[in-house]
Amino acid sequence: MDPQLVVVSNRGPVTFEETPTGERRYRRGVGGLVTALSGALRGRGGVWIASAMSDADRAIAAASETTEVDVGGAHIAVRFVGVEEDTYRAYYDDFSNRVLWFVHHYLWDPPRTPTFTDSDADAWDAYTDVNRRFAETTALKAPESGVALIQDYHLALVPHLLRKMRPDLAIGHFWHIPFAQPDYLGLLPDPWSRGVVEGLLGADVLGFQTDRWLQNFLSCVRSLEGLRARDRTISAGGHRTRANAYPIGVNPDHLAEIAGEPAVKRARTELKRWLGDRALVLRVDRTELSKNILRGLLAFELMLERRPELRRRVVHLALLQPSRRSVPEYREYIDQCTREAERINARFGPETIRLEISDDFPRSLAAYSLYDVLVVNPIFDGMNLVAREGPCLNRRGGVLVLSRNAGAAIELAPAALIVNPVDVDRTARAISDALDMPEAERHERARRLRRLARGRSPARWLDAQLRDLEKARGRG
Amino acid sequence: MDPQLVVVSNRGPVTFEETPTGERRYRRGVGGLVTALSGALRGRGGVWIASAMSDADRAIAAASETTEVDVGGAHIAVRFVGVEEDTYRAYYDDFSNRVLWFVHHYLWDPPRTPTFTDSDADAWDAYTDVNRRFAETTALKAPESGVALIQDYHLALVPHLLRKMRPDLAIGHFWHIPFAQPDYLGLLPDPWSRGVVEGLLGADVLGFQTDRWLQNFLSCVRSLEGLRARDRTISAGGHRTRANAYPIGVNPDHLAEIAGEPAVKRARTELKRWLGDRALVLRVDRTELSKNILRGLLAFELMLERRPELRRRVVHLALLQPSRRSVPEYREYIDQCTREAERINARFGPETIRLEISDDFPRSLAAYSLYDVLVVNPIFDGMNLVAREGPCLNRRGGVLVLSRNAGAAIELAPAALIVNPVDVDRTARAISDALDMPEAERHERARRLRRLARGRSPARWLDAQLRDLEKARGRG
């Protein structure tokens, strides 16, 4: 029989809220990852450990309860890790998102940032504290000889801590974002970079989105004294970790299903009316520095500057889901994007660029079906699922302009127009070329893209990891 | 008999100026490199190719004259490459210093810079144009079967171009600055990064300051299709390049000699009077983003914040030689440093920090003899000679606080206090520890530092390259 699972992630499958009458209800998280991991838990049984996000979650955590929830037909036992708000903010905003996310996406301005003073040391302490609490809760709830699936950069220290507490478990960790090269990772204080790397090496199987981030991780391992990496196997302190690439994908059937919902149809009608006969250059992103929204606007402007005949005949719609508004760098960046969009609209006409900052998934799905050009130009990105979702749902032979630094580029390159994300000149040319592309080529590329984009799924992603974890257990 | 040489560098050994009476005079450039290369030319004969810097230089270039000059007793034939001012600015400021220098020192702010639009394409064109002119002039003037010594990032394309024009030459190129890792170099448009790498691979022998930059270069080579690197030998287009590390040093005897000059003695008396019995925390740098002047100020401030008893008993003297004032990023950075120094002085008392922006080499040498702590904290630095010059001349058992990202750290680490340059907290602690260090340990470290700092010289640096070039010629 397959061993039972414990899934460990910062954000869980559901969030609870209390109704005015004191009843507890939960909302399901979106995304294919929740579906895949929930499906695995349904098949094998087990538990999901996650941060308490709401007051209701924290109340459940405080009572040390494990609650059962239903996620798409799967009955899942959820156990929340409750953390005081200050500690959570230091762990999540200050360390996970302002330090680890920044370093692995190359988002700093080294002449000025980072500086690492006392508040950063506090953030690291909070990070280690929360990781320790996750490891303890996991050690308490994980089924005997089970498989632990630990998710992402928020929980890099858990594998090492958990291995010491529960040597019976097979431990997997999946790193969803890019991994920086040693010069840049070396901007972190040594105890932090070494802590993260050695924390991850507590896993039996360590997953990355692509071979590129995996190779970067191996370079970082080799740059640390006392650690050895041979091929994809790393030896540290008598334990061996097998690193591998497991590219994640989307579930096209599920996408098609929700794209058929009335809210999406309404949004589509509305967007079509607004669009008229203008061509649509679309981006769909979180309001995120690494997504390169700013250069997307500048490239669109440069394209219109070079091609006056396209003015008022092409619009750029940027659908941005609000994210990390508590991080000052994010607020500044989005303000800057807004100002640039206004400046460009003042230059070329109102609604040349329409920048929408709101959480409206149905509208994004509707827009996917309508784009002529989809711009996915992240500075660095672990995988990027917009580059897969868009082609799955588009019906117009839309062209994908894709950053070479997105993990998705490795597989989608043959059917996309690949750009260097910081090269505004080339990005402008790519948008221009996409708009000019003959109908037959557009549709041929769109077909290939759709086929490539459908070739991966969260379920396949998970199965490959579980197989390798079984093998690791067999060796152990 | 040893083959004759041709030295090729952007800045030559001398600059001419015209006196009011129409006479031409020249001033010698400072630095150990000019001395070493001039010495080699004296021993073997040959010519030095360099950019015309002044109107008088340009007049000489326009007349296609080769002029003989005397550099420290060496008679050197100098040939200037004359370039129109606009082209020179695009080649030097816009491409060499704003693109290549920035990428190899990790100085960009990727969410916003670089952007690479039309003016950058023009800068690349100017860079290739000037490199071509250098290659042509070198091809014209290089002695039959001679040795070409090409210097630094300004002239990365010359080796490849020159090899095609003059296959009889043995070609060496020395890269004086760091070399970035592939993710970061990959921010450049492909034709530029590939152009630079393939340009360098025209050399028979390619030199770097340390093994770290050499390994980064090899990683970049491996990331480019069609290029292979095995160990330190790179094969490209039927030609083999041997890469190696040749750490440069200072000439301690020459330093001691100029430190004995009256101007230095006067500056020393003046500095001592100003200093009184306060301890001196010194930095000596060009006004350069990579030198990390700003975090040096912040670390000094944090140290005083933590140790109120040291206020007014320790001063921070920053001697900054003006550099690249035509580059806007540099002006902004230095303005910011000045404002921060004023803010800190307003907080802790006037002249807590003294920031001097002027070209006063005698004063720098005088200050070297007087420091209690020398802060050399570059974000990244090919070698850094201040870290060697200071200990050679210091007479107070001064402690060196040194960035681990300076090439000099590899050899000097055992006797210095090594810091992560972006870690203001640790830099503050290192300055604090240095000030507290017991007398005996200070002097013991200073002795070791002096010995280590004297262990390299420009002459040894050059000899090692010439030996490897002879071997390469033997193989060819």
Image (cartoon, coloured by chain):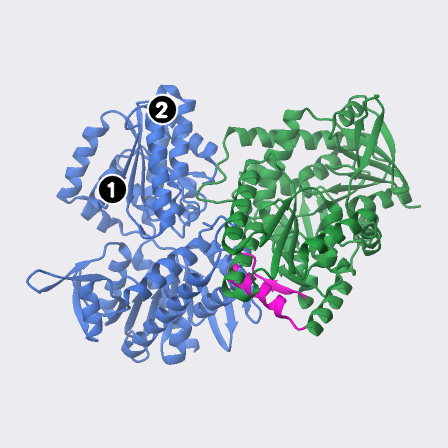
Chain colours: A blue, B green
Between marks 1 and 2 in the image, the one whose residue lies nearer the viewer: 2
Instruction: Check disc 2 and report its element: helix, strand or loop.
Output: helix
Identified at 74% across, 35% down, the residue is B162
Residue B251, image quadrant: bottom right
Three-letter amino acid code of the residue under disc 1: Ser
Q: Is residue A22 above or below residue B35?
A: below
Density class for disc 2 (Cα within 10 Å; few <14, some 14-19, many ≥20) is few
Using the image, name the chain to which the residue with label 1 belongs. Answer: A
Reading the image, the residue beneath label 1 is A364
Q: Position of residue B287 (x, y in %)?
A: 62, 44
Asked whether A191 or A38 is in front, the reply is A191
- Residue B472 lies left or right of residue A298; in this view the side is right
Q: Position of residue A130 (x, y in %)?
A: 34, 69
* Quadrant of the image occupied by residue A285: top left
Q: Chain of mark 2?
A: A
Residue at point 26% right, 38% down?
A356
Q: Amino acid at mark 2?
A: Arg
Residue found at the very far right of the displayed protein:
B1
**Mark identifier at residue B347:** none
Sequence-wise, the earlier of marks 1 and 2 is: 2
Residue B432 belongs to magenta span: yes
- Residue range in magenta is B416-438
**Residue in the picture at 39% in, 51% down:** A383
Residue B385 visible here:
no
Residue A267 or A192: which is nearer the viewer? A192
Determine if residue A48 is in view: yes
Q: Residue A52 appears in which quarter of the rendering?
A: bottom left
Which residue bears the numbered disc 2?
A: A347
- Measuring from the top left, give residue B53's x and y in whole percent: 73, 30
SS at mark 1? Answer: helix
